[in-house]
Amino acid sequence: MRSETGTKDEEYLPLSTKQPSWNNDVQDNLDISDWPDHHLLADDMSASGELSSDKEDDCEAEDSPYPEVRAVARNFDEEHLPYNTIRAWVIGLSLCITGAALNTLFSLRSPRIGLGSLIVLFLGWVLGRTWETCMPDKRIQLWPSGPKLDLNPGPFNVKEHSVIMIMASVALSVANATDVILAQLVFYKQDFGVLYQLLLIVSTQCLGYGIAGMLRKLLVYPASMIWPSNLAVVSLLTTMHESNQSALDPAVFGGNMPKLRWFFIVAMSMFVYYFIPGFLMQCLSIPAFLTWAAPSNAVVNQLFGGTTGISLIPITLDWAQIAGYVGSPLIPPWPAIANTLLGVVIFYLGLSTVLHYTGVWYAAYLPISDSQPYDNTGASTTFAINYGLSFATVVSLVCYTWLNHRHRIWSLYTKGAHEKPDIHMKLMFKYREVPHWWYVSIFAIMFSLALTTVLIYPISLPLWAFFLAIAISTIFAIPIGIIQAVTNTQIGLNVLTEFVFGYIQPGKPVALMIFKNFGYVTMSQALDFVADLKFGHYMKLPPRITFVCQLSATLVSCLVQIIVLNIAIHNVDEICDPRQPSHVTCPGGKVFFSCQIYSGLLLFFVLGAVATIAVHLASQRYALAKHIIVPLVFGGAGSIPPATPLNYLSWGIVGFVFQYLIKTYHFRWWNRLNYLTSSGLDLGLAMSTTVIFALNLAGVHAPQWWGNTVSRTTMDARHTAVQVVLPPGEKFGPGKW
């Protein structure tokens, strides 16, 4: 039940009202002039800065204009709930340290496995409830004359859980800079010391905060910036802490039970089910039955294979194949899924097939879809297409943003946002915003640390290249952030940064990896931080506590990752050796292969601009063209390869069922259970894969029978589906490239 506005249950306050409170972010005399759209909100505010009484009564009826947000985010704020508590910080930092340590260690192993956000969310809930039950109700004082804090501030609540999730989510992602350090220590024997490692990892991880702060007006405050990646987590958090679990809707399937029970049933069902395609009968993961019937037919394996083929019959009974590379298809809106599918069909099923079977780039000697490099040309057909589409995407992003968003961006940063605040924005006005200079200061400090790293240590990265990398991250954060906030797809700059530096400064692999960190990873980190800010926005967390949690967890996780990485390097025998007994082969630490860009791929730069302008002009006349997001058509399937068309096509089919058919014709079910179903499927899969991984470590392997071996005998699975096999000693292609 929602608490009445202004009432507080003193028993559950973390501190006595006579003591200084950690929950001190509510403004007594609210000055809204620093917030966006303050002129639009002024009529709703009284002179004291509170919502006027008649407007306050309407708050519960007012909600987000977007059904995705209405389905998961509460349209009220429980101000009395403590959030900045000892319990939240101890559990949050503990999971932060544990997650950073385990994921860093697991990142050195092949295949990789990690501690996911849903597992951490569940662990946080268990630990929070255990703390609530077991900890004594007493106060402690951390330092003399400091405030007395409640060791057990009452029931574990949704805001504390949200604080824990913010800290954990920051720490779960292993810093890309660890791959650079690993390559330097193991492959290049470059040991510049722990100080260098700390400078590199902290600067690359934290530079994004400054960029994130600059993007708040554009990507956090407007209601239209939904950030779909947050919706499943918000749905699960609110359900776990929902006081009225008895609210049922018997008219829909599963509506006769509390939502939390539905979630656990889905999670446990997936946990049990995944043992079938993941362990007992693995052929169900990629049931390319035509390749089983013709395992030595190259064309059949190329067209219908799911490993190195283009999967013209995209069938899979494995949730890991559907959601493993692209994420859950129950999260992105249908238009985003449709645009991504359009790109897959046009380029990976259409163009790549035409190029492959017409012999372009000596394709007859290569698989049609593979991420492995090959002699003489360097890539399969889809790998080459991926590079070309990356070029087209970069140009398309710039053109798309200029044509569709330039006026809005200009208004945001010169006059303040003109989009009227939704209920979530209005509820956040009561909390003090993070001053802009905080973000600027973080950016300046981290920029100085990064510059020091480049100037002092012999990493072969020219100063101009460092500035160029930072410029790339900053400039592209806006267009990529707009696309990600609406479609749940982050378009990567990895190919662009590799191409730019590799072309200008060839033969410097370590410098290339560092350039990529500053030019791409910094931007990616910034948008991850923005997503967390929007998460705090939905959960009604004060912006300042979100900022402190993010920064604290980032610094702690950086230190933990450096410690774990060095311990592993100095204590694991034969580390990074392909024959390492425990498979600690360092898949992420391999340096970049040298590659030659086909000159024809440079035409994709032109294609990106022409297609974007053409669609923009067409949208002024044809309604259908308004739904086409050209950068997403080009870059939505950027994970191919190593992902395959099977992953995207099956993802799109499931997305069509849930995000179009069910949402359109069974909206009440979708509104109640769609995002909980997504979380349940993902959590069940994560738990099951963890158990299977542990079984393999213990020497318990999948049974060897037809259901586990039939799919391994095909040319598709063995990466040998080529039309022309060279005799021993012969080569193909020109003698000189």
Image (cartoon, helix red, strand yellow):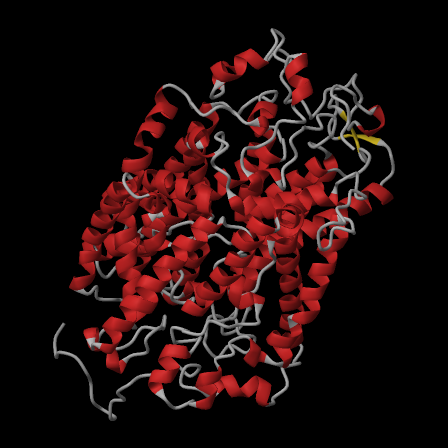
Task: Give the quarter of the image for residue 642.
Answer: bottom left
- Vertical position of residue 276 compared to residue 263: above or below: below
Give the residue displayed 45% in from the left and 54% down from the top: 337
Q: Is residue 583 visible?
A: yes
Residue at image point 68% right, 44% down: 237
Horizontal relation, residue 13 to residue 33: left or right: right
Task: In the rendered view, tell whether residue 676 sits above or below residue 21.
Answer: below
Residue 262 spot, x, y in % from top left = 73, 54
Taking the image as shown, residue 653 lies to the left or right of residue 591, namely: right
- Pick out the residue farthest to the bottom: 727
Q: Nearer the viewer, residue 150 or 600?
A: 600
Question: Hey, which quadrant is residue 636 in on the image?
Answer: bottom left
Tell me: 547 left or right of 300.
Answer: right
Image quadrant occupied by the N terminus: top right
Q: Is residue 637 visible?
A: no
Q: Quadrant of the C terminus?
A: bottom left
Q: Nearer the viewer, residue 501 or 315?
A: 315
Question: Can you give x and y, in whole percent of width and height, for residue 657 in the image?
Answer: 54, 58
Identified at 37% across, 84% down, the residue is 300
Q: Compared to 339, does 135 lie above or below? A: above
- Determine the image quadrant of residue 468: top left
- How many marks can you see? 0
Q: Position of residue 622 (x, y in %)?
A: 30, 44
Q: Residue at x 59, y 85 (%)?
A: 707
Q: Position of residue 457 (x, y in %)?
A: 34, 48
Q: Residue furthest top?
A: 47
